[in-house]
Image: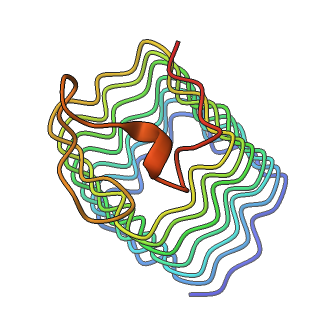
Amino acid sequence: MGANLKEANLREVDFEGANLIGTSLWATSLQWADLYGVQLQRSNLSQADARDANFSLANMRFCTFHETNLMGANFYRANVENANLTRVHSINSTWVRANLMGANLTQADLRWSNLRRANFTGANLQGTQLRGANLTDIILPNGEKFHPQKSDLSQFTGLRDSSLI
């Protein structure tokens, strides 16, 4: 708990179910790592390379992912509530049913990601790139369910500057 693993090479490591609360993983290589169900609350993963990592069912409340490479990562049903995901590179990632309530996704790149049923209530999506993303049944920052034909995204401050095309 609270370990310092910054800049470590942890590629393909199996952390399934581990307790890593408050751990510094700054600039760590986590490519293809299995973090299924891991407890990562208040950990720092800024500038880490977590391409194709599995974060399914992980608890990452209040984590910092500033400028982290999350391309192809899996966040299925992960709890990422109140996390800082500013400027993350998360193209073609899976965020199905993820809890992103209150998360800061300013200038995040989520192009071509699967966001189906993700909850963005209270999240900041300013400048977020969402082109090609699956937005089916997401919950918008104001708590409303997204309807592709009915939702006027210009009214949502968190999505006002997001790129959907």
Which image quadrant is residue 152 in? top left
* Quadrant including the N terminus: bottom right
Percent position of residue 16, x then y:
32, 57
Q: Is residue 100 left or right of residue 159?
A: left
Q: Is residue 151 left or right of residue 74?
A: left
Q: Identify which residue, 22 or 128, lies in the foreground.
A: 128
Percent position of residue 164, x then y:
50, 21
Q: Identify which residue, 124 or 43, lies in the foreground.
A: 124
Q: Identify which residue, 158 or 56, lies in the foreground.
A: 158
Residue at screen point 26% across, 65% down: 143
Percent position of residue 86, x then y:
71, 53
Position of 148 relative to 158 (above/below): above
Q: Identify which residue, 92 or 26, lies in the foreground.
A: 92
Percent position of residue 120, x then y:
36, 58
Q: Is residue 55 left or right of residue 135?
A: right
Residue at screen point 43% across, 27% down: 93
Residue at screen point 49% across, 30% down: 32
- How many numbered marks have been drawn onto this rendered protein structure? 0
